[in-house]
Amino acid sequence: MMKVGSEGLSEQELIAILLRTGKKGKDVLQLAEELYARFDESLRTLSNAELEEIASVSGIGVAKATSLKAALELGKRLYKELSDTRIVLGKPDSVFEYCHDMRLFEREVLRVIIVDSKLFVVFHKDITEGTNNQTLFHPTEVFRIAVRSNANAVIIVHNHPSGDPTPSEEDKKATQLIANAGDILGIRLIDHVIVGRESYYSFRANGLLEVNVNGGREGRKDFESAQTQDGTGKRPSEKRGKA
């Protein structure tokens, strides 16, 4: 590592450093390669695996599995710390980047982001998890945290584990239901963003949620859009790749 730096090492080599020792008949790098292959050579899959599942791999055990889980958790917390710097969510791209971690989730999760009058993040909370839209998007769950926080604006985000952020009819109906409930409570729904694997979908930017961020109902021009023509936001790297 001293010669090439940590960024020059492969995932297997980094895992080997955390494991420290191999097992009978295999050195530590071979063990790391075996472990990584067991979890589809995916850090996402490895991160989402239970401690017991990792520990059950021959030669790993509880101690090594715990070290791996701790390192992966530190990576998640570092990303969160970097994301928690005073952030304004003034366009869908910024919402997608703020909720970048949701790309890793294997189940649908609904995140409520409390924002101030200038769309700066106050805090967020993941409030529901599941696959049933009626449960995932119940207005009571969405606005309970906003009411307790004396908030007057929220952004909701949920992920599609399939990787495709295209909204379903249930997504559209639930979004309108939440927007209507927000009107009654005086809490504006600024946007609903669906996070996919490499892209996102913004209800506001696609004209399905027309609320002036300064109050009242107007057009989508009030919320900056970074959408492609098909309505799905692409990550900056993808945009450059298509130029």
Image (cartoon, rainbow, N blue to C red):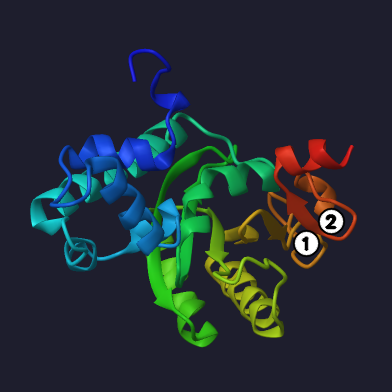
Contact flag, marks 1 and 2 (Cβ < 8 Å): yes
Secondary structure at badge 2 equals: loop
Q: Quadrant of the N terminus?
A: top left
Q: Which residue is mark 2?
A: 219
In the rendered image, the vertical position of residue 15 relative to residue 135, given as above or below: above
Mark 2, Cα crowd under 10 Å, few <14 / some 14-19 / many 20+, is: some
Residue drawn at 44 percent across, 36 percent down: 10
Image position, residue 136 (x, y; %): 48, 78
What distance separates the C-alpha of mark 1 from that of mark 2?
5 Å
Image position, residue 40 (x, y; %): 45, 62
Depth check: give the residue in front, 98 or 102.
Answer: 102
- Relative placement, left or right, of 240 versus 174 is right
Q: Is residue 148 in view from this perspective? A: no
Dot placed on the residue nearer the N-terminal end, 1 or 2? 1
- Identify which residue is drawn at 39% across, 40% down: 80
* Depth order, front residue of 97/24: 24
For residue 210, the mark is: 1
Asked if residue 196 shows in the view, the reply is: yes
Residue 176 falls in which quadrant of the image?
Answer: bottom right
Q: Residue at x 54, y 69 (%)?
A: 161
Percent from the top left, x then y, of residue 90?
Answer: 66, 40
Q: Foreground residue, 176 or 51? A: 51
* Residue 233: image location, x then y, percent: 75, 52
